Image (spheres, coloured by chain):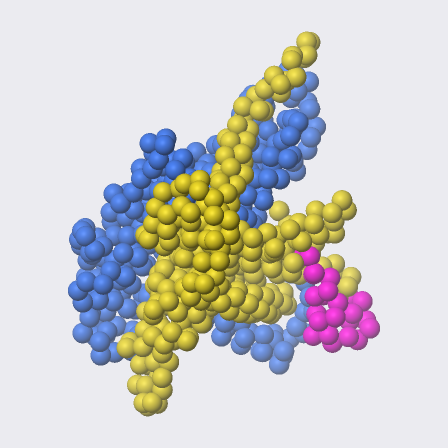
Amino acid sequence: MNSSLSGAEPRGSRPKRFLSPASIMIYSILFIAAVYYLIPLYVMVMTSLKGMPEIRLGNIFSPPVEVTFQPWATAWNSACTGLYCEGIKVGFFNSMKILVPSVILSIIIASVNGYALANWRFKGSELFFTTLIFGAFIPYQVMLYPLVIITRNLGIFGTLTGVIVIHTIFGMPILTLLFRNYFVSLPPELFKAARVDGAGFWRIFLQIMLPMSLPIFVVAVILQVTGIWNDFLFGVIFAGTKNFPMTVQLNNIVNSTQGVKEYNVNMAATILTGAVPLLVYFFSGKYFVRGIAAGAVKG
Amino acid sequence: MSRRPFAPLRNLNAKIAAVPMIVTVLVVFVGCTLWTVLYSFTSSRSLPTLDFVGFDQYTRLFRTSRWTVSLKNLAIFGLLSLAFSLIIGFILAALMDQKIRFENTFRTIFLYPHALSFIVTGLVWQWILTPAYGVQKVVRDLGFETFSFPILTDGRFTIYAIVIAGLWQGTGLVMALMLAGLRNIDDEIWKAARVDGIPAWKTYLFIIIPMMRPVFITTLVIISAAIVKVYDLVVALTNGGPGISSEVPAKYVYDLMFSRGNLGQGLAASTIMLTTVLIILVPWALLEFRPRYRKGKIPK
């Protein structure tokens, strides 16, 4: 129960009794805050389980009188994004097609790069690394248009390849930082011993570093899966209409102006879009927290 | 190694491994940024041209009401988000640090919005705040029939809806960073304060918070950089409306570049965004990366 962010035990003044006035106040404040944080999730789920007549008459906070799963089916199969009525599932599969290669490619490149920066420094490597980290703070809008020109000239603008390359580029600062810091923290004797035994760059990486760095790979995967799944800007610009990711499809479904708004379908589609990162979050626990502590740089 | 190869070929594998980084840094982070700054001084419209017009795009930009409204909104959103997320985040972290039960449950609840997309956050809050069905209707149904909460329909208030949604998503992160900072404070400090009979709130205010200065500064920089980028949240929650009342700079840049084909204005606006980030970043970098910096940064 007590595993904490930095691995240290909780500190601070200890409440003397469980039900002292101070601790009652602490728990009440935390409880009220928790309710506030949970309300949107609750409202989303409740709305998605109601029929439209009940929504028009009722209260967004009240549970459904008659539970229906029809909005979920409609959201998945036949919700309209303005032009097509094929549901949010199109976006789900597009997001998967973007996510899997982007995660793999960006992690391979960043782990090898972080290892080179940690153990095989060369002239200028620190300068490039510092610039890379500063690059993470440049607003994306500054680099968007030139990147459109570059990807167009490479023939990958508006394709899956294009958006995968963009995700790999913008994932690089935080992932490289993550891997470099991890490899620096490993005992240098390991690396030196392998060098003395005649192992080279790739052999040390594959046979010594990789087996030891499973936890940091888990953190990197979580960081990238949530980050790329939640992306909107790169998807809408670089993926092309056919490949719009789930976030873009969701926004088109909910904010498209035609027809009567089906709030229950909208909320079902919203939950479906949030489900992937939420599941990753609930099952990864402390790895997610480690990821955001490092990934906070990404902003 | 028995023979030393020609200098550029030494350590060749590491250089090959770093090629993607070198290309990214030179072409994207340096190259694309310089391109944008350079072309913001040209008369480019739907296509980039190298016809230099000095600061014309900038003077026109600051005469456009949509842009000045965007800047004003960013300032309101930024200041309120910073103040509230730091205060609420710190208070939650301080409460979580009292050896409470269910700490993991509380942390999971406070942090889960951070796992969601801004699009999801924006759409949920749009639904909760919709006057016809959301908070306004619920309060009216309770009997307060004149209650009015037009936060999404009255242009004077829309930016505050974005602040509410943004805080819901972001405060958990601040809490996590602050909690890490609190856990890094030496237990001896607490013991000494207790021996001297200093009340807990005074210890926090006059001893712990000053000690956590580096954590506060780092958090401040991280949130500020994220605030300048705010885009998806606005698109999902209000799409800049009603009218232009909740426009923000990042959305202005996107719209001018990709929907209106006015490249010069978009590039000038994005250069202003870059300048804003640099104003935040450079003093911090100088402070943080001094030869001997202080302890207490975010743990890795």
Residue at 56% in and 56% down: B276
Q: Left or right? Give the position of A56 relative to A108.
A: left
* Quarter placement of the N terminus of chain A: bottom right
A107 falls in the magenta region:
no
Q: Residue at x 70, y 66 (%)?
A: B209
User: Which of B98 and A117 lies nearest the eye of the viewer?
Assistant: A117
Seen at 57% across and 21% down, the residue is B13
Residue B49 x %, y %: 41, 41
Q: Quadrant of residue A47?
A: bottom left
Q: Is residue B284 left or right of residue B82?
A: right
Measured as percent of width and height from the top left, residue A40 is found at: 38, 68
Q: Quadrant of residue A153?
A: top left
Give the camera-side residue of B224 and A282.
B224
Chain coloured blue here: A
Question: Magenta part of the protein: which range?
Answer: B191-215
Magenta: main secondary structure equals helix
